[in-house]
Image (cartoon, rainbow, N blue to C red):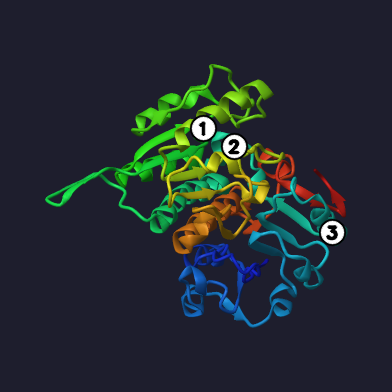
């Protein structure tokens, strides 16, 4: 089997889907691994690092994909990459299939077998391969660091001879994996932290990290899978009032609220932003799904009044070495469940829910 690792073509993408460590493991399995030239540069892995691990460096995507059986990527192939792919090849990546059905249809029409790691079931045996959790965890951390670097004031309480500096206040909207890490990071930096989530049962987790939970009502908007669900109009009015009141004293806002397969909920309007103190910074992590903040744009920083709005759906890309290591390990852990030591080959078991629930195209068909 030939495994191919391309250079990600999206300008903003800094990660790579395999590290020298995981490449060596694949080679130990008996596979040939090809890496596109400079694929790992932005993540801190040189071509020399991959060569030492045993990989073959190739110059062009055409050469890379030729004869490749398994392609490991961070994101779905872009339209300009599709002509280089061949029917029957297996691609493992993040696809955001529900948000981009037309593009996934193109991949199906090409005869590709696409496996979307971002659709892994939430079961215990999938935890070690859960790219959403690993990248969201890093994104929550990186979002706070980015916001703090843009803020025009100090974050922690400081008692100095020249006077006392009060702590900055941070508001985290959404207490999932990214939100909880954002809370923990902001708290460690010395901010006063407040958090909101439509699932009242996460209050204990929020408070265990030292943040104050903003309560709207005891209504529970949680799916059977543990994700947040859509809220009622009455609840949304209460929610906006509570968030607006908190914004009046908030310096940093991190928004992480998503609803699987649907448009991200609008949590902050432009009028609400006017409540924030001058120089405030907002990082909207939901921009790839429409955004939690009115006017935010994915992968762009804009000003609404004197408040900076940073649209960044994947802040983990700001720390690509760490993010790539975790992502690469997630992929390896998934493939390890399908690797047969006796025959030294990967044979995907489509009766296994780990495979059946993430396979979105096969035999020219769209499976979502």
Name the residue that disc number 3 marks: 106
Left or right of residue 113: residue 291: left
Would you say residue 76 is visible in this rendering? yes
- Image location (x, y in percent) of residue 32: 62, 71
Residue 267, numbered label: 2
The residues tagged by marks 1 and 2 sit, at their Cα atoms, a distance apart of 8 Å
- The quadrant of the picture occupied by the C terminus is top right
Relative to residue 56, is residue 151 depicted above or below? above
- Name the residue that disc number 1 marks: 243
Tell which of 35 and 284 is nearer to you: 284
Which residue is drawn at the image coordinates 49% and 35% (left, top)? 175
Q: Earlier in the sequence, mark 2 or mark 3?
A: 3
Residue 34 position, x and y percent, is 62, 73
Which secondary structure, mark 1? Answer: helix
**Number of residues whose C-alpha sits closer than 10 Å to that of mark 3, classed few (under 14), some (14–19) or many (20 or more):** some
Task: Pick the residue in front: 244 or 293.
Answer: 244
Classify mark 2: helix, strand or loop.
Answer: loop
Q: Is residue 222 visible?
A: no
Between the residue at mark 1 and the residue at mark 3, the CA separation in whole angstroms equals: 41 Å
**Mark 2 or 3, closer to the camera:** 2
Q: Are marks 1 and 2 in contact (CB under 8 Å)?
A: yes
Q: On screen, 288 above or below 49?
A: above
User: Disc 3 on helix, strand or loop?
Assistant: helix
Single out the residue that lies furthest toward the top.
218
Circles 2 and 3, Cβ within 8 Å, touching? The answer is no
- Residue at the image position 56 percent from the left and 55 percent from the top: 312
């Amino acid at each position: 089997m030939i495994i191919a690792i391309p250079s990600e073509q999206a300008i903003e993408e800094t990660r790579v889907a395999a590290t020298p460590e995981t490449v060596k493991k694949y080679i130990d399995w008996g596979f040939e691994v090809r890496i596109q030239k400079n694929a790992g540069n932005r993540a801190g892995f040189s071509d020399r690092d991959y060569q030492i691990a045993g990989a073959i460096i190739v110059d062009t995507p055409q050469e890379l994909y030729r004869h490749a059986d398994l392609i490991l990527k961070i994101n779905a192939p872009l339209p300009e990459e599709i002509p280089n792919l061949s029917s029957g090849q297996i691609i493992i990546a993040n696809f955001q299939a529900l948000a981009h059905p037309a593009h996934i249809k193109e991949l199906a029409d090409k005869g590709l077998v696409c496996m979307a790691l971002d659709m892994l079931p939430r079961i215990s045996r999938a935890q070690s391969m859960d790219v959403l959790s690993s990248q969201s965890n890093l994104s929550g951390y990186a979002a706070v660091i980015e916001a703090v670097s843009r803020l025009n004031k100090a974050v922690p309480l400081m008692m100095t001879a020249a006077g006392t500096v009060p702590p900055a206040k941070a508001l985290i909207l959404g207490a999932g994996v990214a939100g909880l890490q954002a809370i923990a990071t902001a708290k460690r930096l010395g901010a006063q932290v407040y958090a909101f989530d439509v699932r009242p049962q996460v209050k204990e987790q929020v408070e265990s990290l030292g943040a104050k939970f903003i309560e709207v009502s005891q209504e529970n908007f949680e799916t059977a899978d543990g994700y947040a669900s859509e809220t009622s109009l009455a609840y949304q009015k209460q929610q906006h009032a509570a968030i607006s009141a908190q914004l009046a004293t908030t310096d940093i806002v991190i928004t992480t609220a998503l609803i699987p397969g649907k448009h991200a909920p609008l949590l902050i309007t432009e009028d609400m932003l006017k409540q924030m103190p001058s120089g405030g910074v907002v990082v909207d992590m939901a921009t790839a799904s429409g955004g939690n903040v009115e006017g935010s744009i994915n992968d762009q920083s804009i000003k609404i009044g004197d408040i900076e709005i940073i649209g960044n759906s994947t802040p983990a890309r700001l720390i690509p070495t760490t993010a790539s290591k975790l992502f690469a390990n997630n992929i390896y852990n998934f493939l390890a469940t399908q690797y047969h030591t006796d025959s030294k080959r990967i044979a995907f078991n489509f009766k296994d829910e780990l495979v059946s629930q993430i396979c979105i195209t096969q035999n020219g068909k769209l499976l979502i």
